[in-house]
Amino acid sequence: MSTPSNTTALRFPVLSAEQMTARQKEVADAIAGGPRGGIRGPFLALIHNPELANCVQQLGEHLRYGAAILPAHIELIVLTVARHWNCQYEWFAHERIARNTTDLADDIIKALARGETPASLSAEQRTLHILAKECLTQGHPSDAIYDQAVAAFGRPGVLDALALTGYYSMIAMVLNTAQIPLPDGTEPPLKPLK
């Protein structure tokens, strides 16, 4: 199990295997045995409610590894959400995923970190970015963006994009509330927005 070294101030203390109930161990083993490879980030807090952790990890696994949109598009949405909620841990983790496992361009990542709509977005990327931004600020996309998203990704892809926006908003709230620290020596990657 991966745990941050600074656990003294956590609102949801990191549980050792010995401290877990049988159900917590079962869910932790299922999470660790899947594509995540371990209990980290939001699951350090979520494991305190193993039924919720189990449901959250199943939805997250579909959205990260089975969505109807490209991995770079997934990370574009996640970074848009992380910036909106100023979630340092979510940004830290997904910036690394975007850089190491997708072709999401550096200038796009840097513009998102500044809270800007990147100038170099493709038409599909722009549609997803605006769809996420409108959902975060209005609770739904405009008709024009919805229609563009359906034309580009089909209704299944639009539903994945909407679910990604909502899921990673929930994860940002868990991380921000739990105050999961960044790895030792890591500076917060997001600067305050002006």
Image (cartoon, grey):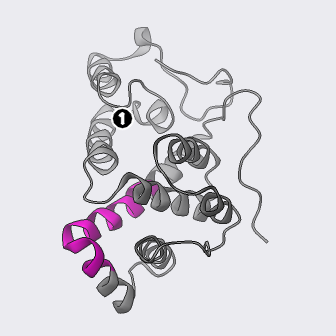
Tell me where residue 34 appears, x and y as whole percent. Answer: 29, 28
Q: Residue at 33% across / 84% down in the picture?
A: 148
Residue range of the region highlighted in magenta in the rendering: 149-168
Q: Is residue 24 above or below residue 10?
A: above
Left or right, 111 with respect to 30, comes to right
Q: Residue at 40% across / 56% down in the picture?
A: 74
Q: In which quarter of the image is the C terminus?
A: bottom right
Dot 1 amino acid type: Asn
Quarter residue 36 falls in: top left
Q: Can residue 35 be seen in this view?
A: yes
Q: Is residue 76 above or below residue 46?
A: below
Q: Residue at 46% across / 62% down in the picture?
A: 77
Q: Is mark 1 on a helix, strand or loop?
A: loop
Q: Can residue 177 be seen in this view?
A: no
Q: Is residue 154 magenta?
A: yes
**Residue marked by disc 1:** 49
Tell me where residue 48 appears, x and y as whole percent. Answer: 41, 31
